[in-house]
Amino acid sequence: MKTYLIVYFGTTGTKASEIAKNLEKIGFETVYGPYDFIYRWDAQKPTPEEILALGDKIVDALKGSGAVFNLDTHD
């Protein structure tokens, strides 16, 4: 399973490169294509609670940056 992340950067606040570094610190990979970042779950399927906990980590990583995000988790 993977969680795909799209980040909508603001024009004020943290630079995109700094946001990427913060997201990589919590386990995301920067990618090219329809999504900006991917989080690869271990062999197990994540629970809804685990996905929400990852969302909480993203909120913390983006706090004060002016960015917003969208998550999409599937195979």
Image (cartoon, rainbow, N blue to C red):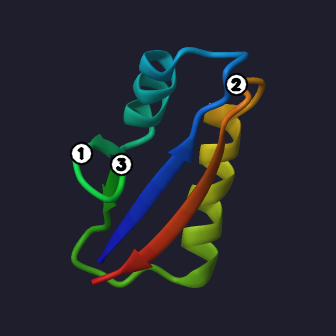
Decide which of tag 1 and tag 2 comes sooner along the chain. Answer: 1
For mark 1, give the secondary structure: loop
The residue depicted at 45 percent of the width and 39 percent of the height is 26
Q: Earlier in the sequence, mark 3 or mark 1?
A: 1
Pointer 1 residue: 31
> Which of the 4 image quadrants contains residue 58?
top right
Residue 39 in which image quadrant: bottom left
Q: Given contact means CB atoms under 8 Å apart, are the residues at marks 3 and 1 in contact?
A: yes
Say which residue appears at 54% left-offset and 15% top-offset.
15
- At label 2, the amino acid type is Ser
At label 3, the amino acid type is Phe
Cα distance between the residues tagged 3 and 1? 5 Å
* Residue 28: quadrant of the picture: top left
Is residue 18 shown left or right of residue 62? left
Q: Quadrant of the N terminus?
A: bottom left
Q: CA distance from mark 2 to mark 3?
A: 17 Å
Residue extending farthest front: 11
Q: Viewer-proximal residue, 11 or 7?
A: 11
Give me the C-alpha separation between circle 1 and circle 2: 20 Å
Q: Which residue type carries mark 1?
A: Val
Q: Is residue 16 above or below residue 38?
A: above
Q: Crowdedness of circle 3 by 10 Å Cα count: few (<14), some, many (20+)?
A: many
Of the two numbered discs 2 and 3 on the same chain, state the one appearing first in sequence: 3
Up-down relation of residue 69 to residue 48 (above or below): above
Numbered disc 3: secondary structure: strand
In the image, residue 62 above or below residue 45 = above
**Residue occupied by mark 3:** 37
Residue at the extreme right: 64
Number of marks in the rendered image: 3
